[in-house]
Structures are given as structure tokens and as C-alpha cells.
Image (cartoon, rainbow, N blue to C red):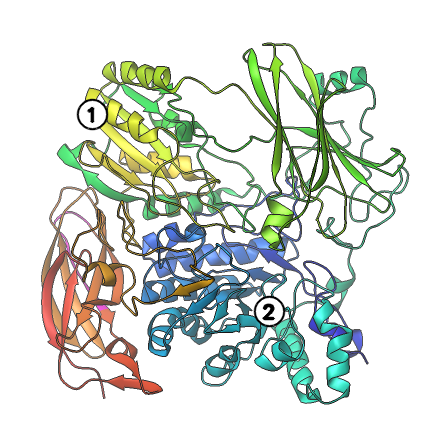
Amino acid sequence: MDFVRLLSGSSVWRTASEPLLGLPELVMSDGPVGVRGPGWDERRTSLVLPSPTALAATWDVGLVGELGALLGSEARRKGVDVLLAPNLNLHRSPLGGRHFECFSEDPLLTGLIGAAYIAGVQSRGVAATAKHYVGNEAETERMTYDSLIAARVLREVYLAPFEAAVAAGVWVVMSAYNRVNGASMAENPLLRDPLKTEWGFDGVVVSDWGGVRSTVASALSGQDLAMPGPNDFWGDPLRAAVRDGTVPEAVVHDKIARLRLLADRVRVLPEAATGPTPHAECDAPLQTTSPDRPHPGREAPRAVPKTLAERVQLTRNGGLAPETAGSEQAAGGHAGDPAELALLRRAVADSCVLLKNDGGVLPLATPRIVVIGAHAARTRIQGGGSGGVYPSGVVSILDGLREVAPGLVHVPGVDVQAGPTPVDRAWVRMLGGDGEELFAEDRRTGWLPEPSVVEGTTTVEVSSFLRPEVSGHWRLSIAGWGRLTLSVDGQRVLDTHVPCDSDDPATVHLKPPFRHAVVWLEEGVEVLVTGTRAIEPHTGRACVLAADPPRPDDDAAIQAAVDAARNADVAVVVVGTTEEIESEAHDRADLALPGRQDDLVKAVAAAARTVVVVNSGGPVALPWRDEVDALLLCWFPGQQGGHGVADVLSGRREPGGRLPTTWSDVPLLPAAPVHGQVIYAEGPNVGHRGWLTADRSPGYWFGHGLGYTTWSYESLTPVGDGVRVRVRNTGERPGREVVQVYLCKPGSGRPPRWLAGFAVVRADPGEAVEVVVGLPRRAFQHWEAGGWRTEDGEFVVHAGRSVVDLRLKCVASPSP
């Protein structure tokens, strides 16, 4: 029996099966904010949660557990066995490009929130995946850079969330692309010790996609599964290594045993491994398709009209023929039931962080409201990259506010869209070498990571009708690798060749480069825009057709916003980042908001009472924070973001969030490697720990967040393996408080202060509540000389509202 075959995937998202071993095929899907399912198809929608940073901002393990269970149920509905989430890397630097996909800067908060997420997902019989193990805090050069991390720092900070995940029973761990202390993570001894030996992890170590780039070294390291597959390094070369004894058979048998245990855990039924493929997978083996023989796993497509007249008629009829129209469920999506949407909405409110509220401008109580900013109408609900999903429905902040303030006025504000905007609907044809049509389909967007390429395809053609809203020079764009062309009403306006210069899967398959043509278009005059890309080996098949109008005059837009603000009681300005700034595969150059959003905020704040809502995944510079009246962070809030933000702004719910990472206009640390290395020279003093030793203060400290009531901290008492904290709601409305407990030991050489525990409490006006916050033994320990050590003597315990807003203290000693 060919056991080696089972150690790499059978395709991009599926493992190999072997009935004689009782080993079924396992289906994997990206997360973490939703379950996309294998492959990319906008017609198969998903529920979209708030970003992981937002989840950590709730500081609520119970809520995150519920959301994890929701994802587990979604995975079950989609036939997914392994969810490739959560991301347990830390916010070492706010410049990290994947900041939004990670929980926090703190190892304890990340570990506890991550463990709750894992437990929720796995409660539904779906494996969660703790990733990216380890030291993967940068995106630039992520396939090759070397993280230089001292043993103590690894143990106390960067390995700690993964240790918590293993303690929570995680079933899969993903090895990272990068190296740590010289060794690629797929070959790193850290996969065995401490992961499999000391911690006792009995699950599967899967590679990041394309992360296995050797044979013997990776096979002996503790790597169990190479994805995607088949993997050349783990094919014939590994078979040869097993035959000659370089890789012992026992090593292969251990990997197979782990895969079988994973299959048992996800409760895969034998027939589930033999069902039809739900949709095409990236770079999967090509299938022959003809008009009377549909693409495997798809309903027979309606033929794309070939003449301009036919396409015009189709457009006027709404684009979908009766046999292809229908609900999200008919298309393989999931719209969400009321209870699920209510949970997502509650999560938004509990994650929103109110940084500032001068004069009690919030909650809004004025009749005349103007809402300003592009992000109000086009709220960014998730970050960019491999974790993206197609939402079942999006409620923008503007939509949500219109329900609570029907008479509001909206002003677009300045332009922030730097990247090309995919067209809303496209017709796609797969063409053979002589130009014949092999397959055609109607798509809901011009952004197509995986058009349904079939055997014999040499060119992907994407077409869309464009009816310009304004006359002017429009920028038309096509993205892909190889030969690219653009035509307008049959007239060629671009013909170029783009060689593939990257081996990063996210770049090759999700972010191919754009090429542009600027064309004069008349308002209201419909044109047919067609783009093509050639299909060449090892370049994927991603294709994007985009169109952008002439850029507006930002000075005029700012003046319009100021005029509208002067006629309102309060202005709500929504600002945020774009995918060009916050996305997988690259880090940020700085923390500035794109475009002239800072100028917009300053101008409006000078004219009216101003509330700013920040729609970003991670920290941004806030140079105007002293000039505005209120400041609310909503992160990337998921598909119910508009309702949740409106609930907070209107006072229907409290802004329940607290900062999971420190916010400052200028970061303490860079993110990107220098000369191929990321040197963790700050040691354990990451995030707020580093700021506590700095000669300047951040804008807002770790743990900070305001509500609509006030709290007094009345007592702090050691009890058992923790402390009892008594707090009282001293305001006039019910409230939610996050009680934070920190430890310190002066003169010990440890960080000035570190988070040791936390708890969420709720109380009515005047009500006092008590909560016991556990202090595990590990909270008192540090790593020294290859083991955990506890210093003698007493530790100082602080309780309060943030790392610097400390209301009570006592002393405590670790339990023996």
C-alpha cells in the first residue's frame, strides 16, 4: 500500500483517502471570519463574523465560544471537516499586514480567546487549526525570512498561545512559512519539542500551502501533512527516502495514525468522501466540459450570449435566466437565520471600543445627523487575503444608521479607493487555442480567483457592460499573469504580457498584478468591456476585470462635507483603511489613513460636533483625536457591522470593547524583515510591555475602553488560586465592564507589568458585583535554563480598567 501518497493532499483543499485504512477524504476551508468552503465562488456565500481583532476586543471567552460554534455549524453545512483558523500570531507591530486576522498583542488574551474559538468550532465536530506555528508576525518576504527569537521569549510570549490551544484540545496545527532561528518551520525541531513531546499534541501538523519545500528534513521534523497536493517533495523522493531508511517507516506510520485520528474526530462518514466535488478548486486537475456535459459538481450553465444584442437583452432582464436564479441556498450559500444574525450583531456591539466621548456626545440624541465618508456606505467588513469569504448580505454603517435616524444626510467625502474596483457582474468564457468556446458562466463579480477553467483552456475571457454615471477618462483594468488584453466595444485598448515573478500562493492566486487603460466614456452610453488573460503553467487562473470613474475633486468633497456638517447637530465621520493597506502578503509602510481622510476629519471637526468611527483591522494614526468629540473603533465588523455600530451610536447597546492592542500614531517596532531577518530584540516586552518602558506614551493603552456608565472598584482580595474583585456600576444605565488583573514583581527583571487574568461583568445602576479572576501558576512563572521557574516572594496584583488605569492592588503568592 502506498502510505506516502496519503501524506500530501489529493488536490488544493482535500486530503487523499484510503478505504482499506478507513481513512476518508477530508475537506479543508479557509477562515477565520467565515467558512468559505473549498475554492472561491461568490455564488456560495457565508456568514461573516467580526475580525479576530474585534473578537479579542470583546475580552469575552463565552461569546467567542458561541461564535466558534456558529462557524462549526456553518462548516458542517458546507461539508467542511477542517477550518484553517484561528491565527494565533501576535500583534508584535501594528505595521503587520495581517494584523486584522490575529487576536491581540498579548499572549494570555490571545491564548484564552483562541482557546474559546477552538472549543466552539470543535464542539460541532469540525477541526480548528492553530496557525501559524510560530514567529510569523510579518508578511513581507514571509516565505523566506528568519525570525530570531530567544528561547525565553519564545516560551513566554510567542509559543504561549499555541500551548493554550493544545491544552484546549486543538486537532490541527499549521506550520508557518518562515524560518525560526535558522530552520524553516516545516523542518523546525519546534514541531516535535515542545509541540508533540512536552505538550502532548496528538493531532496533525499541516503545512501552510506550499510550505513543505524539502523531503527528509521536513519528514523528520514532525510535519505530518503537506498541502496542497500532490506535493513533489513528498512524492517519489519521500518514497525513496523510506525505502533506503533515511526516513524510518515508523515516522510515516505515526503521520498516518494522526490522520486517522483526525478523521475519527471530525466524524466523517465513509460516503462523505465519495460525494461530488461541490465546485472547482484552484489548480485542480482540469476536466473536459461541453455544453451538454456540465462542469463536475455544477448545474449545467446557461450559455453566455455571443452577440451584443443578446447580451444587452440579458442585462435588461436582470442577468439571470430563470433556471439559474434563486436563493442563496440554491447557489450553495447560507443567508443566516435570525438567531445567527442576532449573535453577529451582538458581537459587533461588544467589540466596539469607545476611545473618547467628550461632553457625552454619545449616545446620539440629536435629530439632525450628517454621515460623512466613503466607508459609511462601503463599510469594510473583513480584511484581504486568503481568509476572505463572500458575505450572505452586508449591512453598511449608513444602512444601520438610517434605521435609527431615518432623516440623516449622507455626504461621500474624499475618495479613498486606490485599487481598481471589480465590476459588479461579468460573463466569463473559457477559450481554446483556436478561440473556440469550451465553457461559459455568468458571475456576480469581476473578481475571479478561480474561474471554471476546463481542459484545453488557453484563455479566460471576462466581459461586462458598463454604463458610466459621469463622462470622463475612466480607468479600465485587467489583472492576471501572462498575456493580458482589454477591449472596449471590440476595440483593443491594451495588449501586454506580465511574467509571474512570485511563488507566494496569496500573490499568485489572489493578487495578480493589474494593467490599465484610460478611456474616455460618455455618461449614460453603455459599452462592452472585455478582458482576457492567458493560462500558463504555474500561474493559477485568477482574473479581475475592473472599472473606475474619474477621480473626484477632494477639495470640493471636503467643502461639501463641511457645509453639510454646519447644518447638522452632529457629524458622524467614518474613516478607514483599504485592501491596499491592510491585507495578507505585505506589511504596512506607516499607520496613516489613505487619501485625504485626515484633512476631512479636521475640517469637519472645526465646523461641527464630530463623532469619528474608525473602520480598520488594526491601529491607524489619529492625529486629530484631540479635535473631535467622540471616537469609536468598529474594526472590520463583519456582515452585521452596520446594525451593531448603529446600536452603539444610538445607545441601544453599550460599546463593550476594550483595546486588545496598544494604539499609537507611531509604532515602537517595525514589522518587515531587514536583510531577510526579523530580530525580536525587544525580548518579552512586546506591545504595552514595551510602551511601559518607553520614553513616550501611546495614544491609547492596552485594555482601554469607555462605556455609557461609570464604575468604581471597591475591593481586591486574594482567594484560592486567584483574586476576588468587587466593582459597582455608579452610573445611570446598565453596563458591561471588563475587569483586568495584572501582576508585577519589582526588581525581578521581568516586564514592568503583565496581564494575568480578566473577566466580563454586567450590572444595573447602583448594583455591585463580585467576580473571581483565576491566576494560574504559569502567570507567576518565567522561562529560565530550559524550564519554568517561580521566583520566591510576593507579587503585586493590580486590578483596573486598563494596563495603566489601575484602581486596586494587593499582594499574592503563587500556589505551591
Q: In which quarter of the image is the N terminus?
A: bottom right
First along the sequence among labels 1 and 2: 2
Q: Quadrant of residue 544?
A: top right
Select label 1 or label 2 by which is in front.
2
Q: What element carries label 1?
A: loop
Percent position of residue 699, x then y = 21, 46
**Front in this rendered view, residue 546 or 536:** 536
**Front in this rendered view, residue 264 or 221:** 221
Please name the residue that numbered disc 2 is placed on. 206
Q: Can residue 713 be seen in this view?
A: yes
Magenta stretch: give its range. 764-772
Please name the residue that numbered disc 1 is placed on. 609
Q: Distance between the residues labelled 1 and 2?
A: 52 Å
What residue lies at 76% left-to-right and 27% top-to-bottom? 321
Pointer 1 local density, CA inside 10 Å: few below 14, some 14–19, many at least 20: some
Q: In this view, does 393 lie to the left or right of 319?
A: left
What residue lies at 22% left-to-right and 51% top-to-bottom? 704
Percent position of residue 316, x then y = 70, 16
Q: Quadrant of residue 187?
A: bottom right
